[in-house]
Image (cartoon, rainbow, N blue to C red):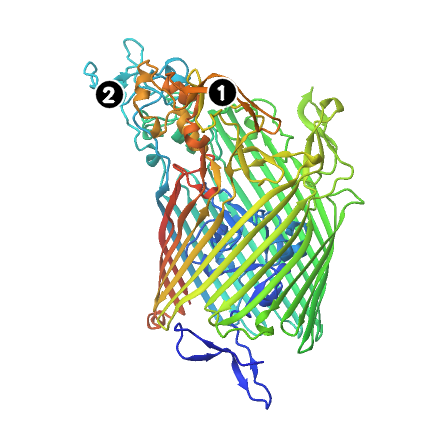
Amino acid sequence: MKLHLLIGLGLITGLEAYGQNVQKTGGPDSLKTHEKNIDEVVITALGIKKEKKTIGYAVQEVKGEIFEKVKEPNFINSLSGRVAGLNIKNSTDLFQDPGISLRGAKPLIVIDGVPDRTADLWRINADDIDNISVLKGPTASALYGSVGKDGAIMITTKKGKKGRMSISFNNSTMFQTSFIRIPKVQTVYGAGNNGKYAYINGEGSGSEGGGWIWGPKLDQRDPSTPSGYFETPQYNSPVDPATGKLVPLPWISRGKNNIKNFFDTGIIQSNNISVDWGSEKATFRLSLSNIYQKGIVPNTDLKTTSISLAGSVHPIEGLTINSTLTYNKEYTSNFPEVGYGPTNYLYNLVLWTGADVDIRDLRNYWVAGKEGYQQRHYNVSYYNNPYFQAYEYLRPYYKDNVLGNVNLEYQIVPKLSAKARVGANIYSLNREFREPKSYIGYGNKSLGNYTQVNGNYFDITSELGLKYQNRYSDNFSLSGEAYVSNYYRELKNSEIRTDGLIVPGWYNLFNSVGPLFAPTDGNRNKKEYEQINSVYGYVDMEFYKAFFLNVTARHDKVSTLPKGNNGYFYPSVSGSVLLNQLFTLPDWVSFAKVRGSLARVSSGKLTNDTYGYISAFRRSNTSWNGVPSFYFEDILIDANIKPETTDSWEVGTNIALLKNRINLDVTYFQTRDYNNLTYVPLSEGVGYKYYLTNGNVYQRRGVEFTLNADVIKKSDFKWSAQLNLSQYRKYLKEAYGGADYTTLFNPANGRNNFIRVGERADKLTTMPYETSPDGQLVLRNGYPVNSTAPFESNMGYSDPDWTYGFSNNFNYKNFSLSLLFDGRIGGSMYSTTNQKMWWGGIAPGTVNQYRDDANAGSNTYIAPGVRVVSGAITYDQNGNVKSDTRVFVQNDVAVNYNAFMQSTSNAFESNYHYYKQTFIKLREVTVTYNFGKDFTKKLDLSSASISLIARNLWLASKIKNVDPDSGMDQLQTPATSSFGVNLNVKF
């Protein structure tokens, strides 16, 4: 092999040999290759370490150091923008899981080689993470069977290291002091309707205006009143003792800053102390952590405490035992309810509280003399007092988690080892829902209720196998592992609640007015058991140090499918070729590799129900004289139904330039998802509503780029950067029964959407108004005309055109600066917040002369558009215009502005409230000072650093009032910025 030389092209000085230990042997130069980055070892399926250059599929690693300074209660949020193809949709709500999508599907979470099927991300302590490997696609994770069909996030925790005992302390404290996106509401008009409001009793009817914020203008002068302003009876009006009537109060904008006045400063504080020790015979690590988050919503918080013990021991020659045991507790006395409706704070605070109400006045939330029975609010029929909601509607949550695993490896002979692993996952969950009297839900006012929810979970994975490794010659090596495995899981859920409360505020099952109630729907009261018996393994082959081939196979026999049809085989094959070993490449090319892979993986269940393959009687919520009744399920299951299956392939390349100063990784992938389950509607005359069978076929495809660069690399100054870029698409290729279309639910707009065969499956649709050929709105009697087309219109696609992350790290002497930007380009979402703001009268755009005219009883609003004077439009069965004989004139019909907005929510002018998700966010900033050796020696420290840290500092996007990060809008908590300090000390 020739001795390659790298010329740095000005980025480095002189000539440096691409290698070390060059020896003259009398023949051609022999070279021991120096490939510190190229020979990088990564964690793959089953926790197996492999050289990255040998892998035939896409893997991307994230080092644990990124989690040490800027702490999030949920570590997964810190992965935003750091992995190509991994899309994290962060939630602004306390204790709500972020959306995780890897190549368009939810990946498996694996901790120290053991799958975590519960995917509880809150119990994983960031300080205990050594590194994360993201295995992209089914090939990478096929050894995990059905649960690994969409890739995996492999978490490897820290273990003890050889050397003297060391103690580490890490504290991170951040304050959520400001908002980067918050709804901006109008403060010119108050509660009521058609410009009128007078409080009666809080029921919302009559002069109270039905709960709308289309009331009178605020701060209007009236010299005839004592205050000099227009006055009207309000919820906090005193009662005139002489007349017994409410005393009118000034109608002024007391609540201009209601949103900021209601929310508190949030706090995120993390503390970790760990002890690390190791020798030739054993290693040991003990870690204790606590995270406290005070929510910005009053009286909400989240606490997690973790104790982790990890170690290894070599008791006899050839035997290695590794073990990890973690106890984690998640607990909170209260966390916010989410989703649209009166149980959401934003619903009550932003949408349905006008500036006539000062939120601080509602801090006294009980009606005097009716404490415990009646909340105090301007409306007690439709809405909840936000403070009453925060301090009385409580949702305690207590969860105890235990995770542990033991790994043994014994070398039988030099090339053959026996391996065994046992991993267990246990949790106990206790939840409560404390609902006070007068609490408002949709269509009901509570008599008080108390609900207890309990869950107990246990799973254990046991594996026994053999490992073989042998280098037969310089040009060929073979290694492999084979296992038999058993997975067992049991889950027990129970829920019971009162039927009203006798004594208000005493939340106890014995305080029920009526008989206790145990719901039977869903998964709230059930027991389930699952077992999987498996045989699996892999073979790795290396040829001429340039060709690498990996073959995996797994066979599962599951308890969640019908007997005789419950055994499935999952194969995969992958390979890579090192071009730099085969060809003499230019000196500036350090490394070049091409790779490819194929895999097939099937789901182990029908839907997500353990017993979804069984049609059986279920208990109903109806009883007769105390005797429960049962009903037979309304779903007929196809006797030949098959599990959902994915066939996938991918190709990619990895190129390193300028002695690994620049590293580019590119991947193209494609999957075919077939045997997807479809519910076919049936005539109820056959005794069933739906027929469950295999139907739609989808294709997923995408491309991923990762570019790493050491931009500047000097002795006292370094600048490194990483760019992650990815695109993903999903298409409907076939619909059940040869149909031309289907409907698919999409959380981006919260509804089913009309999708034709061949179209993207993430299409968002809505039934629009009728328009003219040139796109103008068609109106009749001054109001929009609904389209008569048989199909809905395309409002965009929820998946972005590109998802990206751009990180920069600067090091100058003892200082370092880290910046992370990430975001999305393209993609659409429906905004409930913006739609309801227009509908309810709280949007700033509703402040205009037309509204004043409407309040005065005048109809002056002429909507832009046209009206039809003759003719009609017809459509064919596919929704195409068949004929259009309409004749138009400009709309000239004036209507009441308030009524128009209440009926349309300004939909046409606002693109039906579909908005682009495009945004860029300054996700993370860290400025660190590493104390010098002179300072640390004086304090007997091995190292110490202090950092100024910040998270979510800046957001740029076109959508108003909401943060598009979550990819959906259901009245989420306003997005905040976090600022703080991190202290990291090691003894």
**Which of label 2 and label 1 is nearer to you?**
1
The crowding category of the residue bearing disc 1, from other C-alpha atoms within 10 Å (few below 14, some 14 to 19, many at least 20), is some
Q: Which is more toward the observer, 446 or 920? A: 920
Question: How many discs appear?
Answer: 2
Secondary structure type for disc 1:
loop
x%, y% of residue 615? 74, 33
The residue that appears at 41% across and 15% down in the rendered structure is 205
Q: What amino acid is found at the position of numbered circle 1 in the picture? A: Arg
Residue beneath label 2, please?
Answer: 220
The quadrant of the picture occupied by the N terminus is: bottom right
The residue that appears at 28% across and 13% down in the rendered structure is 240
Secondary structure type for disc 2:
loop
The crowding category of the residue bearing disc 2, from other C-alpha atoms within 10 Å (few below 14, some 14 to 19, many at least 20), is some
- Place residue 693 in its image quadrant: top right
Seen as rendered, the residue at the extreme left is 223
Q: What amino acid is found at the position of numbered circle 2 in the picture? A: Gln
Q: Which is more toward the observer, 743 or 938? A: 743
x%, y% of residue 224? 20, 13
Q: Which is more toward the observer, 957 or 386? A: 957
The quadrant of the picture occupied by the C terminus is: bottom left
